[in-house]
Image (cartoon, grey):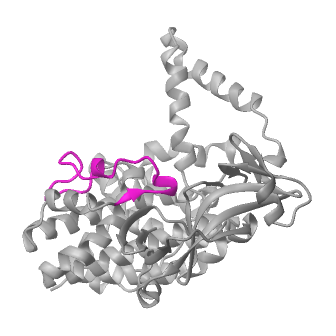
Amino acid sequence: MNTGYGNVRWHVTVAEPDITSFVPQTQNSLRAAIDHLSTMPTKTSLGEAEKLLGWKLEEASASFLLAPDMQEWCELDSCTFDAMHALWSNGIVGQELGYWYTALRRKANLSLTDMRRYVELGWHGVGRARGINLLSLFTVHLWREGADFRGDAGQALFVLSICVQFGEDIAIGLCADMRREHSSLEALHRVCLCVLETKRDTAHGSHLARLQAEHVRSFAAVYGADKVRPKLHYSLHLQQQCWKWGRLVDCFTCERKHRAFKRVARRQQMLARFSQQCLLELASAELRSKQPAKRLLWRLDGRTTENVDVGTALGATAPATLAPRALGPDTISRGDVLIPSPAEAFEVLGVTSVDSRILLLIHVLEPADLHFNTTRSGRSKWTRASTLRLHAVHIESVASAPRAMHMREERIGNTTHIWLLE
């Protein structure tokens, strides 16, 4: 007789992509779970009940979720799942990159050396990946057959799109049997792109649940539903959280604050008061650092110069002020490549202020393969004419556009062909 979960009515596993198939936890159900755990007579029965309920009695009882003084401030529905940890920090991106690399080694007989040679064809980081040594993302310390990709969140973020493009350009051509692994990795890449775009504009979040369902199906088809981990299920909550809070938040900024803690911790000499002193210094620093509302308005940043010709070309009555970047709700810098649509992309040459308007000075790129740009999410092909085509656009009209993370250029005749990866 089969006594597995298949006979349990309404049972679904973490491989189920429809989040509405699950019953949400509430503060009352948490209290009921803890009350039940507290009645367990033995350690064995307690351990089994904890495994089935998903809560640890000791840890949950001592947490802020059940602290009487915190009930008016924070309950279970105030907690959110973090996109960074679900996807990039020891998350499903690292897991699937590990599975993909293992298949790459065993099916296509390709190695890290082949991947490094591909990067050396001219790929370099732009935008948030500017200054990253891409070869450092392909080392034996990060990649091992039969193991997850071992990079941190930033490395997982930067390496994914290159691996997708390597799969299409190299792996599938050498081994058609890699198509299913490639399709799953490509579907995961689309999910990650949607999350990043939703951080800039929540309207993109309307596509997230559909893209996640497509990825779950592709992943389970090639690797098996039993390989789906809880973090993939956690990520399915991101769209609901985005609608609830009106924004998609993650821990990238919070994690960067670990540096501040390390600076404070190194100065501490009284270990008996280590925690209290660190918390006091960090909290005091936050209170002292005032952030006026105007910081959310676009403004020039960096060394500025005045240019009469640019001001005249833009129809201004005074010289234009030029700067290498603009700060505001985001940062846009010289050298960034923005991709508003499959038919439109441009390189940022600088930022200017003309008659109180913040404009981007751009060089427009032409689509080299519109069909490719339309059918490959996050990957596109363009050309750059040898003659500079200088234009200006209002920064707010394009600030939420997707941005390239990696770029490769190849000169053919008088035309430069450009591959962009987001």
User: Along the horizontal axis of the image, is 26 left or right of 294?
Assistant: left
| Residue 328, image x, y percentages | 73, 52
| Residue 321, image x, y percentages | 79, 50
> Is residue 134 rendered magenta in the image?
yes
Does residue 120 appear anywhere in the picture? yes
Residue sitting nearer the eye, 92 or 191:
191
Q: Quadrant of the N terminus?
A: bottom left
| Image height of 295 relative to 126, above or below | above
| Quarter holding residue 87 | bottom left
Q: Residue at x 70, y 41 (%)?
A: 69
User: Along the horizontal axis of the image, is 291 left or right of 51?
Assistant: right
User: Along the horizontal axis of the image, is 285 left or right of 50?
Assistant: right
As drawn, the residue found furthest toward the bottom would be 371
Q: Residue at x 51, y 32 (%)?
A: 259
> Is residue 356 rendered magenta in the image?
no
User: Which span is picked out in magenta?
Assistant: 123-150
Q: Residue at x 21, y 48 (%)?
A: 139
Q: Main secondary structure of the magenta part?
A: loop
Residue sitting nearer the eye, 173 or 210:
173
| Residue 410, image x, y percentages | 35, 69
Does residue 329 appear anywhere in the picture? no
Residue sitting nearer the eye, 232 or 62:
232
Q: Residue at x 68, y 62 (%)?
A: 361
| Residue 227, image x, y percentages | 25, 70
